[in-house]
Image (cartoon, rainbow, N blue to C red):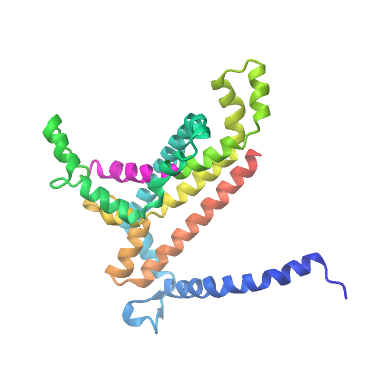
Amino acid sequence: MTVTAATENRILAAPLVLFMLALLGFPVVLSLIYAFSSTTFETLANPSFNGLDNFARVLADGNFWGAAWFSFRFAVVTALAECLLGLFLAVFLAPLIARHGWMVAVLIAPMIVAPAMIGLMYRLVLHEFAGPLPYYLWEWLGLRLSFFGVASVFWTVATIETLQWTPFAFLLFLTAWQSIPREIREAAAVDGTRPWRMFRRIELPMMMPTVFVALFIRFIDGFRVFDNIYVLVGAGPGGVTRSMSIYIYEGFFRSNQIGIALAASVLLFGAAFATLSLLTRLRGGMR
């Protein structure tokens, strides 16, 4: 009996597939059961089925839509800022890094720190009464700024997120820029192509797949952000920095509404899956 290559691959992949099903399948099934049930910590072992009631309550909750809008806006702003800054740094510093490779380790240092520690650090630095930055702004320039006020807290958390994760985009773009064959650049230079035109017409189009991947990864990370914002300001004044992850956390642990929190998680997963499918289609159309 001859075993085909496809059958052999399935046999070899079977243990990994079974492991992933055991690792992820049970929690997913349990979450779906709770999402369609009236569940609290007291009734975890005996949830009562209530159909789509949890989803209806989530969709009727203004805090849910506020959290969804914040997460979407935060993800778009931070993903664009990180990729633009990362692309600029990668192209601008590439010649210098070619001579001093150790600079990469310095530039990517912020993304090595745990996001919760970043949030705690900036909470101390930017604190209105105890923070050194507000103090010196007032002492030297006479500026009284509230970094965590309603009007400015969004841009504060977006800036902190951008500062931490721009090195990730920078690393991707630097790798993509360095992978462009030298012969292409030399041929363009011989033809008299100026650096800006070379970047716009040759280098950037060749880096576009990496740009797409970086935008997608940073958008997803920005949309599901939790730890650094929660440590920094929590839901913020008036709930203006309540992300989807914070909304789910509050419903689960603070309000003891496990069914409603998991219904929101299912909606979040559905939105992420739809976004992934749409972006994949757009990416396929760009080829």
Kindly tell me whether residue 132 is visible in this rendering: yes
Rendered-image quadrant of the C terminus: top right
The single residue placed furthest to the right in the displayed view is 1
Does 162 appear in magenta? yes
Magenta residues, as a range?
150-167
**Residue 97 vs residue 114, the one in the foreground:** 97
The residue that appears at 48% across and 31% down in the rendered structure is: 96
Magenta segment, prevailing SS (helix, strand or loop): helix
**Residue 173 vs residue 150, the one in the foreground:** 173
**266 versus 73 height, above or below:** below
* x and y, in percent, of residue 173 in the image: 53, 39
Kindly tell me whether residue 62 is visible in this rendering: no
The residue that appears at 55% across and 21% down in the rendered structure is: 195
Q: Left or right: 180 with respect to 135?
A: right
* x and y, in percent, of residue 4 in the image: 83, 67
**197 versus 169 height, above or below:** above
Q: Left or right: 153 with respect to 109?
A: left
Q: Left or right: 235 with respect to 79?
A: left
**Residue 88 vs residue 230, the one in the foreground:** 88
The residue that appears at 36% across and 46% down in the rendered structure is: 161
**180 versus 153 height, above or below:** above
Does 280 appear in magenta? no
The residue that appears at 87% across and 72% down in the rendered structure is: 2
